[in-house]
Image (tube, helix red, strand yellow):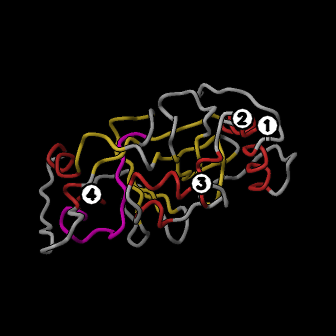
């Protein structure tokens, strides 16, 4: 469980969670395909300043991937470590060769396992289709096709994921650990990493500068 500071139940996080469920007294909030935005009260160094995309959320718990915390590993190095040859040659002037993209730190769970967010299309050996615009695959075959240039065009590759047991995420939300908002695929796939946190906050109609440790008391 993430380490949190506590604030009253009328906090932005509490209101955000209630809005997502449609009922402020709802015992379960289905936040699949939502962003979790870490509040300043999130004292856990693993999750402080992060945006997590929730791929699955039900009564048994939740699973997501941090989308704005890069590791020192590039895609090129990842491919080498799993014995794949990157066969894509970037076009002249192309400023984002896939081999130079960083692999994300997806979370502290299963840190040696790859979690790939991508646009749906072909189903791979282990694919969870979250929406019509986002799927998550944990099998190597998606990376094999990416390396060959035949895989999904929009991808985010992470090592590890973020997981919560039943009721754990809901508790963190009501204690002002997270803001929640419906996800925008463009933030995951198109924006530079450094811009993703602010863009996610902006989906709520507020500025990141409005997020302070006292914001729950406003």
Q: Name the residue nearer the viewer: 180 or 146.
A: 180
Task: Give coordinates of residue 26: x percent, y percent.
Answer: 84, 47
CB atoms of marks 1 and 2 within 8 Å: yes
Decide: is 117 above or below 186. above
Q: How crowded is mark 3: few (under 14 residues within 10 Å), some or many (20 or more)?
A: many
- Image quarter for residue 22? bottom right
Decide: is 83 above or below 7. below
Measured in 3D between alpha carbons, the distance from the residue under mark 3 to the one under mark 2, in whole angstroms, is 17 Å
Q: Which residue is drawn at 62% across and 39% down?
A: 39
**Circle 3 residue:** 201
Q: Which residue lies furthest to the right in this view?
A: 25
Q: Which residue is drawn at 46% across and 45% down?
A: 66
Q: Residue at x 67, y 61 (%)?
A: 205
What residue span does the magenta drawing correspond to? 145-160
Mark drawn on residue 39 = none
Q: Name the residue nearer the viewer: 210 or 183.
A: 210
**Circle 1 residue:** 217
Q: What element carries label 4?
A: helix
């Amino acid at each position: 469980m993430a380490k949190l500071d506590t604030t009253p139940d009328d906090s932005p996080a509490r209101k955000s969670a209630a809005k997502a469920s449609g009922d402020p007294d709802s015992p379960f909030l289905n936040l699949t395909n939502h962003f979790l935005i870490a509040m300043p009260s999130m004292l856990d160094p693993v999750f402080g300043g992060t945006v997590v995309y929730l791929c699955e959320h039900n009564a048994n718990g939740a699973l997501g991937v941090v989308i704005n915390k890069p590791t020192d590993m590039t895609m090129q190095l990842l491919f080498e470590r799993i014995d794949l040859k990157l066969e894509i040659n970037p076009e002249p002037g192309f400023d984002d060769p896939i081999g130079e993209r960083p692999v994300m730190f997806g979370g502290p769970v299963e840190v040696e396992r790859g979690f790939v967010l991508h646009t749906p299309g072909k189903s791979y050996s282990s694919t969870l289709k979250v929406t019509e615009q986002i799927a998550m695959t944990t099998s190597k075959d998606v990376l094999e096709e990416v390396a060959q240039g035949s895989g999904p065009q929009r991808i985010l590759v992470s090592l590890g994921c973020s997981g919560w047991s039943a009721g754990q995420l809901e508790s963190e939300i009501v204690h002002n650990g997270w803001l929640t908002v419906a996800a925008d695929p463009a933030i995951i796939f198109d924006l530079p990493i450094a811009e993703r946190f602010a863009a996610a906050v902006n989906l709520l109609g507020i500025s990141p500068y409005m997020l302070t440790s006292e914001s729950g008391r406003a």
